[in-house]
Image (spheres, grey):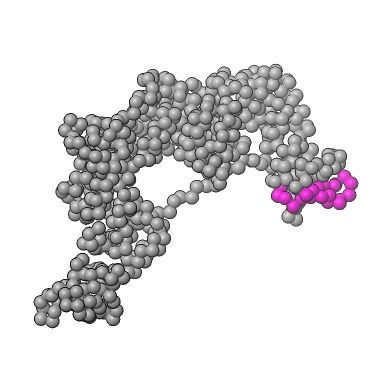
Amino acid sequence: MAASDARTLARQLSARSDESLAALFDARRVSPTSPWSDAFDAAEQLLDPASLARAITDLSAREAHALRAALDDAVPAGPDRDALVARALISDDGTAWDATAAALRAATVVSAPAAGSAGAARDDPAPDDAAPADAGSAEPGSADAGSAGAAPATPGAPETDAAAAERAFTAVASLADVLQAALTSPLARIGAGTLGAADRRRLIESGAVADADAADELVAIAEQAGLLAADGRTLLVTAPGLTWLHSSTIERWLTVAAALIDALPRALRPVEDGEAGDRVDRGWIDVDAWPGAYPYDPAWRARADAMLTALRRWAVLDATGAAPAWTRPAAAGGDIDADALAALLPPEVDRVYLQNDLTAIAPGSLAPHLDMRLRSMARRESRAQASSYRFTAESLADALTAGETAQTLRAFLEELSLTGLPQPLAYEIERSASRHGALRVGPDGLGHTRVTSDDEALLRTVAVDQALRPLGLVSSGEASGGDALLTRSSPDTAFWMIADARYPVVAVDENGDRRALDRHRLAGAAQPAPEPVAVYAGLLARLRSAESGDADAAWLGRELEQAVRARETIVVAVRLPDGTEREFTIEATGLGGGRLRGLDRNVDVERTLPVSSITRVSPA
């Protein structure tokens, strides 16, 4: 690293705003706890070969091309130069630092756009014109970047929009089933953060997904869209995920598609107004160019493949990577044509056939909000477009436990049914409701939870049930007919433990009025990431406090300190009283009291030189 480069960069860093410095540190992945004491420390570390190597892996193909061109000439003014300056890879005037040039020459191109694709820089050498070179010097986008830069083979044959729409419908339905499964029981994650094998099997056996790959891909899509979130070693449905489950099919698809498209990195965005323009925030470049979007990043190909897989799974792209009719406008920077997709999706129905065998048959795709309600009281048996559901004593008991009543169940089913409410189902609802609620669980106003019942025998059974032993239920000791069981556990905890033991229990408030409980355990609300200026507030304050008016003097003092620490032999230029300048070759041995001490190598004499008279320092 040239000392003059570090000094120049230190000056430029000092002139930046806090917001600009914080954005730089964030882009270069600087630790907020870095022990830098001043801008010179920052400049030296930013020009460190290891730091520059990491920064080069983050370069887009256009930025890499501009930086390589800067090895011969300054980068012209424009968005590429601004991006490189912002990350301190080049000077404010567009010239590359010596350390950056060395790091770029040492870097290896691991992937490149297909020749002639939209992602290749216009001035990159064409395959026929490229001279032989090693991988470290190959121009991004050139033939010498190696076979890794070739576009991937077409993953599938062209498909019709109708076929792509069918994939969209299947993906939405499958993801809804995955979220339903996660509501019932959180999905487990292994150490690598991926879905556990047991839950993969659970999703496959339940019919939610076809295979393990589909499970992994849909879970990754749900996390990307914010429908699932990690909570330790589990994945929980988020509040937006629960809202999503109650949305229509087309709204479900649009929500996830927008999240996937918004997450595309800027290197995949098209360029506005030709090669001199900036990247836009919408749309994407040809899929053939994606592999070379980050030519120096060895992890990029895997990331690009994962993004393409998700977009194909969700029918944002078709099997060949092309945009179907509904996302073609979005690919060009516009909006998704929701009507084009909705016209090809199976129509939703809002009625079912209730049958005497305690089943319900939906003659099409049941509207999601109705499907959610129906599944709270019946078990879905088939997952075709015409779904079937079965009512059982257990499923009706679960609905009653969750807050339904015989009246609300009858009202919902009578409105939903095309065939009225069959007598067998009506009888089963009444029978379940009459048995349900024999136990009541609620607060007693004194900090305890109270379990009451008109059936003393049932209370005695609950009191000795070993499955409920963790509740520590004890008799209240009240007179016969008003006996109760007390526990220090919360009302919700006691309620769900008793319900899981299959007792007919309802939750009540302090007044004895029934209340509904939602058992769903949702992920906590995601906290917005702090702004970089807040993350680096401590480091910024330290750098600002070290600033002085004379940057040259500060840098000179730094060079002298380093020379003394290393006992280096340096050439020191000193301004004499008569205004002339003289050079001394000094082995620096001490610095203090405003004086430099060392051995004059020319005459082997110890010298003491006033620091204020030293105008420059250079290696001997």
Q: Is residue 550 above or below residue 492?
A: below
Q: Is residue 432 left or right of residue 372?
A: right
Q: Is residue 173 left or right of residue 39?
A: right
Q: Is residue 581 above or below residue 310?
A: below
Residue 422 placed where, x, y %? 70, 20
Q: Nearer the viewer, residue 471 or 373?
A: 471
Q: Is residue 599 visible?
A: yes
Tell me the quarter of the image containing the N terminus.
Answer: bottom left
Start-end of magenta stretch = 472-491
Q: Is residue 474 magenta?
A: yes
Q: Quadrant of residue 305?
A: top left
**Residue positioned most to the right:** 480
Tell me the quarter of the image containing the C terminus.
Answer: bottom left
Q: Is residue 280 magenta?
A: no
Q: Nearer the viewer, residue 508 or 572?
A: 572
Q: Residue at x 20, y 41 (%)?
A: 276
Residue 597 placed where, x, y %? 25, 78
Residue 187 placed where, x, y %? 57, 38
Q: Residue at x 42, y 31 (%)?
A: 309
Residue 295 placed where, x, y %? 30, 40
